[in-house]
Image: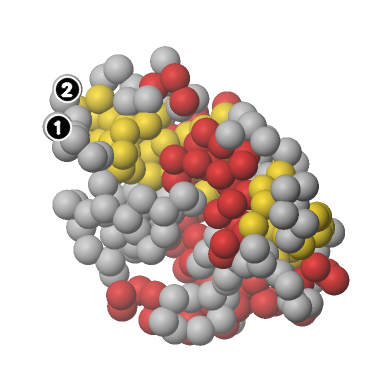
Amino acid sequence: MADFLSLREAVSKHIHDGDTVAMEGFTHLIPFAAGHEVIRQKKRDLTLIRMTPDLVYDQMIGAGCAKKLIFSWGGNPGVGSLHRLRDALENDWPNSIEILEHSHAAMACAYDAGAAGLPFAVLRGYIGSDLPKVNDQIEFIDCPFTGERLAAVRSVRPDVAVIHAQRADRNGNVLIEGIVGIQKEVVLAASRSIVTVEEIVDDLNAGVNACVLPSWAITAIAEAPKGASPSYALGYYDRDNAFYKDWDGIARDREAFQAWMKANVFEKGAA
């Protein structure tokens, strides 16, 4: 059964320097509160995995948490670049960072293979692409049944998965509503998992087709109201579109970034 911990305790206990950490949530339920706690605890040398690294990873990279990023698209959705990521890549500030890029399809397949305990995933893709020239996690194989040339990608099996969800019940089961993305696969693929939730309830009131993560698949649950803000949590709050626009100006300047982080992350401790 999952342990119920404070967010501070969950991050301290289950995320260590040098870990491979996947923080997922597509557009919705992005685990910002957990990312901020990682920053506050000054975790270092992390390999960060995310299909769509956006603001939370820009903040973690700018805070010096990351040594490597594995991803399939990176940017500030609808706005532009991730300036802290670009500064790390182009100027080694605050430290250098290595990147490994995949396609969306390959990342999804790699998570799925990891969840199934398989060493790699197979897909039709990457034929004619230049990504295999710069990504050593992509190989090509011949189908033993048809002879078709297919791409193979190493499965993603993180040390730690971190996601946000709407509710957990007191038995440690978690309900995810709305856009599910790849959250259930990353939890199943990881050695350990931290799930932050809007609230802990007696009954999930899950519908018949709901995505419910069972307690046995989860290592730790932390209650973190508004834990996905400025992204949104269906049924709880909307996306803060203005902040995504404002972040472009904040992140462009190192001093403005550091001032924002001091006021909004370091001086706002987690419970």
Element class at badge 2: loop
Decide: is 32 above or below 101.
above
Amino acid bearing label 1: Asn
Q: Amino acid at mark 2?
A: Asp
Question: In terms of image quadrants, where is residue 258?
Answer: bottom right
In the rendered image, which quarter is residue 43 located in? top right
Q: Position of residue 7 (x, y in %)?
A: 43, 35
Percent across and percent down for residue 57 are 56, 61
**Residues packed near mark 2 inside 10 Å, few (<14), some (14 to 19) or many (20 plus):** few
Quarter of the image with the C terminus in it: top left
The circle drawn on residue 44 is: none
Relative to 74, residue 223 above or below: above
Q: Nearer the viewer, residue 99 or 85?
A: 99
Q: Residue at x 67, y 36 (%)?
A: 118
Comparing 149 with 174, the one in front is 149
Find residue 245 and report its horizontal and vertical position in percent.
Answer: 39, 81
Residue at (72% x, 54% y) in the render:
146
Residue at left 46%, top 27%? Answer: 218
The numbered dot on residue 202 is 2
Q: Residue furthest front?
A: 146
The residue that disc 1 covers is 205
* Distance from Cα at disc 2 to Cα at disc 1: 9 Å
Marks 2 and 1: which is nearer the front?
Answer: 1
